């Protein structure tokens, strides 16, 4: 999904599901609330339960846009497939909804005062103040989407290499409609 901070991948590999889960367990460590001085001994933190996993990348810095990565490993005839979903964390998503929603409300109120209120004769029509909320909405959206997409790139590359990907399919809204039709 190019215009949403959300990624859904299907990685196909010739490795067995047991090999994939073993490699995955070797690449993650348990969640820790605070990490002092350094990133950690492994590149990811999280948990694996059966064939389901939930992880996030460990960095030596704070990045609110790091994706929360969940997925499942499914056995196939010639190996297995790994379905991976990457999304922003809940607190970041809630903050951005409040930010973008507040800016949208500001836009609507300015729109009202610029175009509806002159009909009553109380104000003059000046659309230039509309540029402020439009710019703030665009900046907030670009920051949210760009920050997430940029932070998801290392994880995509890591999983493709870790699982010796034979094929990677990005699944999105457009792909879902193509398969249904």
Image: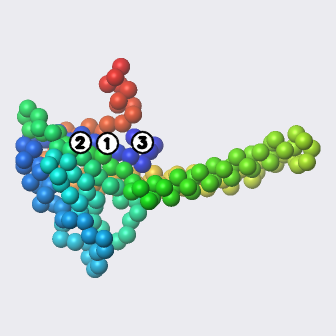
Q: Which mark is residue 8?
A: 1
Which residue was labeled with disc 2?
83
Residue displayed at 29% across by 75% down: 35
Could you classify mark 3 by the number of other residues whose Cα lies within 10 Å: few (under 14), some (14-19), or many (20 or more)?
A: few
135 to 61, vertically: above or below: above
Rendered-image quadrant of the N terminus:
top left
90 to 62, vertically: above or below: above
Mark 3 lies on a secondary structure that is loop
* Circles 2, 1 touching at the beta carbon (< 8 Å): yes
Which residue extends farthest front? 49
User: Which label's residue is closer to the chain start, 1 or 3?
Assistant: 3
* Circles 2, 3 touching at the beta carbon (< 8 Å): no
- Can see residue 60? no
Q: Position of residue 32 (x, y in %)?
A: 26, 70
What distance separates the C-alpha of mark 2 from that of mark 1? 7 Å
Q: Position of residue 161 (x, y in %)?
A: 17, 51
Residue displayed at 16% across by 60% down: 27
Could you classify mark 1 by the number of other residues whose Cα lies within 10 Å: few (under 14), some (14-19), or many (20 or more)?
A: some
What distance separates the C-alpha of mark 1 from that of mark 3? 11 Å
**In screen coordinates, is 171 left or right of 64?**
left
Residue displayed at 8% across by 32% down: 77
Q: Where is residue 68 in the image (x, y as percent from the top left)?
A: 32, 55
What distance separates the C-alpha of mark 2 from that of mark 3? 18 Å
Q: In which quadrant of the rendered view does residue 60 lie?
A: bottom left
User: Which label's residue is closer to the chain start, 2 or 3?
Assistant: 3
Could you classify mark 2 by the number of other residues whose Cα lies within 10 Å: few (under 14), some (14-19), or many (20 or more)?
A: many
**In screen coordinates, is 71 left or right of 76?**
right
Which residue extends farthest right? 121
The one of 72 and 150 positioned closer to us in this rendering: 72
**Which-is-in-front pick, marks 1 and 3?**
1
Which residue was labeled with disc 3?
2
């Amino acid at each position: 999904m190019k215009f949403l901070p959300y990624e859904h991948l299907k990685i196909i590999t010739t490795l067995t599901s047991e090999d994939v889960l073993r490699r995955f367990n070797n690449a993650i460590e348990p969640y820790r609330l605070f990490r002092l001085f350094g990133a950690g001994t492994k590149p990811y933190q999280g948990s694996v339960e059966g064939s389901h996993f939930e992880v996030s990348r460990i960095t030596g810095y704070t990045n609110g846009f790091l994706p929360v990565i969940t997925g499942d490993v499914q056995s196939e005839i010639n190996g297995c497939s790994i379905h991976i979903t990457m999304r922003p964390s809940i607190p970041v998503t809630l903050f951005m909804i409040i930010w973008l929603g507040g800016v949208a409300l500001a836009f609507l109120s300015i729109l009202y005062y610029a175009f509806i209120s002159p009909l009553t004769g109380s104000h003059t029509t000046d659309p230039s103040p509309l540029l402020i909320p439009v710019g703030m909405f665009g900046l907030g959206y670009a920051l949210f989407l760009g920050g997430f997409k940029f932070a998801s790139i290392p994880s995509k590359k890591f999983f493709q290499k870790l699982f010796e990907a034979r094929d990677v399919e990005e699944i999105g809204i457009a792909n879902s409609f193509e398969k249904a039709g």
